[in-house]
Image (spheres, rainbow, N blue to C red):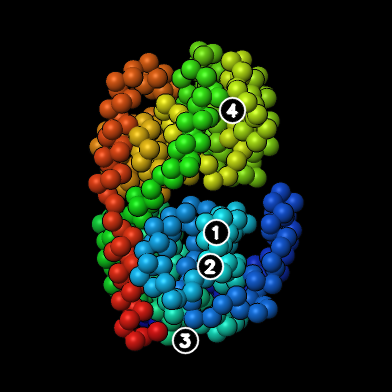
Amino acid sequence: MPNLRLLLDWTLYRLALLIAAPLIPLRLLRRGRRERGYLRHWGERLALGRAPVTGALWIHAVSVGEMRAAQPLVTALREAHPEVPLLFTCMTPTGRATAESLYGAFAHIAYLPYDTAGAMRRFLRRTRPRVGILMETELWPNLLHAAARLKIPMVLANARLSERSARGYARLPALTRACLQKIEVVAAQSEADATRLLKLGAMSVRVTGNLKFDIAPPPALLERGAAWRAQWGARPVLLAASTREGEEEALLRAFAQVPAEVLLVLVPRHPQRFDAVATLVEAAGLAYRRRSTLDGELGADTRVLLGDSLGELFAYYAASDVAFVGGSLVPLGGQNLIEAASVGCPVLVGPHTFNFAAATQLAIEAGAAQRVDDADGLMDAALKLLADAAARARMGEAGLAFAARHRGAAQQVAGLVTGLLTAGCC
């Protein structure tokens, strides 16, 4: 019966791929209308052309957040194995741009092919990585099957699995189990993540913590944040960071009732939405400027500063008095609040933080973050904090201590990878 269930799951997965395959070019073209990067490097998405490198340590991070989370692990691996080349793969143009900015000086960068059996076989046969590292929870059945056939050890690093995601994987239980059992070692963020992964079939699971705690705020961005704050003037600053579709309209409606001396800095999560969010600010009747066109001081009449820039989130946190971390007012699971805590910025989050449940709960328990119910509650909580310097200072200090207390995951995960590199299996 288990073999029959696995055959059924594989059949369903391959049938879904077969149906989707003709739609891939249409999807790339449609997305390319908003984000030109989707129109480039199509050959890589099918594993066509020359291999970017062979015999590398291979790290796959689907997009921006995962690519940034890999930074401390990359540093640890380069220190331990400077002779081994690095290959980074991703799925999105913004992920690729992030990889190029962070690692382009010393690593090879490409798109991971779509998870068809032929494309994955070609990719792995041509690149022959010594170890593959999948960031967070990226389970691609054909990739893992091909890696196992070629005896390429795979690591699932910084693994997290919410209850919602676990239910999704459980719909194809035999296939999920087969995938997880092809992974040499799983480095989970928390005990809860480890428990869910073990229940789904993972064999070797270690709780190593969250790599994002090991990302140190870059001094250059902290300095940039201080310079911005001088430009913005002596007024309270509320940051809405990494906001998602469905949040900004409610945020702007609530913010319109806030006293005019408060500045809202609004930073959408996805760059392709910058123009759409600018339209929402205009519709709300709020005077605004864009970070990309701001030159000099920000006028006192400006109510909203639209953060339409990439790679500057630490600077935004450093320049703000209070930060709301988005994706949490709507049921999208929230975004990473560790960066805000690590620069001592008090944090507010909405009710939906299931993608970062462990880190969010720890931050709330530490006194570094507060939860709100909706946009109106967010503005009420923000105004109370903006009026209470002592409360902000307590939350900021709690955030710094919270971030420092949970560091160390990078060295643990690097140790697991080193064990595979030196075990003679690769």
Q: Can residue 23 be seen in this view?
A: no
Q: Which residue is drawn at 30% across and 62% down?
A: 411
CA–CA distance between discs 1 and 3? Answer: 26 Å
Mark 2–mark 1 contact, CB under 8 Å?
A: yes
Where residue 373 sits in the image (x, y, percent)?
Answer: 40, 29
Q: Helix or strand or loop: what does disc 3 sit on?
A: loop
Return the residue nearer the eye: 86 or 209.
Answer: 86
Counting from the top left corner in percent of width and height, residue 53 is at 56, 77
Three-letter amino acid code at the position of disc 2: Ala
Say which residue label 1 marks.
99
> Closer to us: mark 4 or mark 3?
4
Amino acid type, label 4? Leu
Q: Which quadrant is the C terminus positioned in?
A: bottom left
User: How far separated are the C-alphas under marks 4 and 3?
Assistant: 51 Å
Front position in the image: 135 or 54? 54
Determine the image quadrant of residue 398. top left
Indicate which disc, 2 or 3, sits on the residue closer to the N terminus.
2
Relative to 293, 401 lies left or right = left
Q: Residue at x 36, y 55 (%)?
A: 211
